[in-house]
Image (cartoon, rainbow, N blue to C red):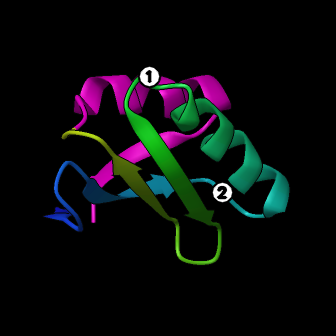
């Protein structure tokens, strides 16, 4: 798990997502996670399988898992 506070009220968490292989995959995952309340930024990188999420507060992992599932991929946990 990689989670740390960048600025007061901001939390950065890196998740591992399996199955991403291209820019479209990155966009799908980013779009779904961006819909979670409190998320301010999402950067998905298919080549590493990592998704970096910046949020106002720590996120419920089940909400992230549901968003990744909705995009058609599998949350492998936090990096």
Which is more N-terminal, label 1 or label 2?
2
Q: Secondary structure at mark 1?
A: helix
Q: Quadrant of residue 31?
A: top right
Q: Residue at x 27, y 66 (%)?
A: 79
Are circles 2 and 1 on residues that touch, CB within 8 Å?
no
Q: Quadrant of residue 8?
A: bottom left
Q: Is residue 52 left or right of residue 46?
A: left
Q: Is residue 38 left or right of residue 67?
A: left
* Foreground tag (2 vs 1): 1
On the image, the x and y values in percent for residue 25 come to 74, 51
| Residue to which mark 2 is pinned | 20
* Up-down relation of residue 33 to residue 16 (above or below): above
On the image, the x and y values in percent for residue 49 come to 52, 66
- Residues rendered magenta in the picture: 59-79
On the image, the x and y values in percent for residue 59 come to 25, 35
Label 1 crowd bin: few (<14), some (14–19), many (20+), radius 10 Å: some
């Amino acid at each position: 798990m990689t989670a740390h506070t960048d600025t007061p009220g901001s939390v950065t968490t890196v998740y591992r997502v399996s199955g991403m292989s291209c820019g479209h995959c990155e966009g799908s995952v980013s779009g779904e996670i961006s819909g979670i309340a409190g998320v301010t930024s999402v950067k998905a990188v298919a080549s590493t399988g990592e998704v970096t999420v910046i949020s106002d507060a720590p996120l419920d992992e089940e909400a992230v898992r549901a968003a990744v599932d909705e995009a058609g991929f599998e949350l492998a946990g936090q990096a």
